[in-house]
């Protein structure tokens, strides 16, 4: 029975890990494994992995420059077909979010392309960035997964 | 990620396989820069046919290789991207800077 406190419609996972670059592949593989229950196409799955990789890399490179911090990741299913991914850090924050989201803009030198947010935007339906200097940043992204087969 | 390299007649071919992200890009760039310095090739071909995943770190790497090659008076281009890496290349608009030869 569905009551006020029924959470069965909100399927989620939460993980936290250190901002070591070796965790980039761990994070995207974990989210992909969770998203698999929505029966995505290989292309949808690759898009989701790409966006997670970008968001987590931003934490590693920009939020915690030269130090190891904690990255929190939550993935949940909203309604029956929408995947929402939240990637959060407690790093240095982004002074100008609008500028950071511009294509080719980076403070990461020539190791970085400045295309991270652009790629997240083009691979996900919606992305929201909240940041406070000295406190951290959170990136929330959603992607609707198209239904391919009828539910049994 | 692995990079297989082959050098002949002034052409340096870098064939990427596996997943290219920020974790792998840094050591890869170091290796590639020393290869370019060692061989001083005329052309550097970045072959992505066996690459299964790439994020914007790959874009930065391709741009850096391209810059390094033009610094020594050479050229570089990308060959055979497919699947997800191809879509990342398209989303980035990198083809305005570096030539991308898609599989025919």
Image: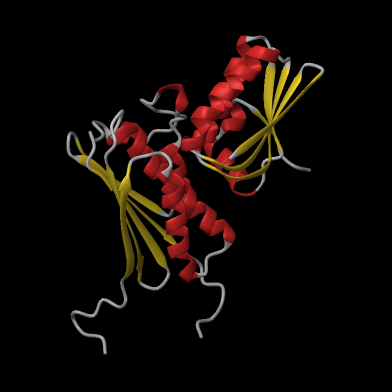
Foreground pick, A6 / B11? B11
Residue A53, percent from left and from top: 44, 45
- Is B81 on the left-hand or right-hand side of A56? right
- Is B36 on the left-hand or right-hand side of A77? right
Q: How is the image coloured?
A: secondary structure
Residue B69, percent from left and from top: 64, 16
Q: Please count the marks in the image.
A: 0
Q: Residue at x 43, y 64 (%)?
A: A34
> Residue lying farthest right?
B9
Q: Quadrant of residue A9?
A: bottom left
Q: Is residue A130 visible?
A: no
Q: Is residue A23 visible?
A: yes
Q: Residue at x 77, y 16 (%)?
A: B10
> Residue lying farthest bottom?
A1
User: Can you say which quadrant of the picture contains the N terminus of chain B?
Assistant: top right
Figure check: A25 above or below B70: below
Q: Quadrant of residue A134?
A: top left
Figure check: A128 above or below B68: below
- Is A11 on the left-hand or right-hand side of B1? left
Q: Residue at x 23, y 31 (%)?
A: A95
Residue A51, percent from left and from top: 44, 48
- Is A36 on the left-hand or right-hand side of A77? right
Q: Residue at x 53, y 58 (%)?
A: A44
User: Can you say which quadrant of the picture contains the C terminus of chain B?
Assistant: top right
Q: Quadrant of residue B40?
A: top right
Residue B70, percent from left and from top: 63, 14
Foreground pick, A109 / B99? A109
């Amino acid at each position: 029975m569905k009551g006020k406190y029924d959470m069965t419609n909100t399927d989620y996972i939460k993980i936290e890990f250190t901002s070591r670059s070796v965790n980039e592949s761990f994070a995207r593989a974990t989210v992909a494994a969770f998203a698999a229950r929505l029966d995505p196409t290989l292309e949808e799955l690759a898009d989701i992995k790409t966006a997670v990789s970008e968001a987590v890399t931003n934490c590693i490179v920009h939020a915690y420059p030269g130090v190891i911090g904690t990255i929190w990741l939550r993935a949940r299913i909203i309604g029956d077909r929408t995947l929402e991914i939240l990637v959060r850090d407690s790093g240095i924050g982004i002074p100008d979010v609008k500028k950071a989201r511009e294509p080719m803009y980076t403070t990461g030198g020539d190791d970085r392309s400045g295309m991270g947010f652009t790629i997240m935007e083009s691979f996900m339906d919606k992305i929201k960035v909240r940041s406070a200097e000295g406190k951290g940043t959170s990136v929330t992204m959603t992607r609707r997964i198209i239904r391919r087969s009828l539910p049994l | 990620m692995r990079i297989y390299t082959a050098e002949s007649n002034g052409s340096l071919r870098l064939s990427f396989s596996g997943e290219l992200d920020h974790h792998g890009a840094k050591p890869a760039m170091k290796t590639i820069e020393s290869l370019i310095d060692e061989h001083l090739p005329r052309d550097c071909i970045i072959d992505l046919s066996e690459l299964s995943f790439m994020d914007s770190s790959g874009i930065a790497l391709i741009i850096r290789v391209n810059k390094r090659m033009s610094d020594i008076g050479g050229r570089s281009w990308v060959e055979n991207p497919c699947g997800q890496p191809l879509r990342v290349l398209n989303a980035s608009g990198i083809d305005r800077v570096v030539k991308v030869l898609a599989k025919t």
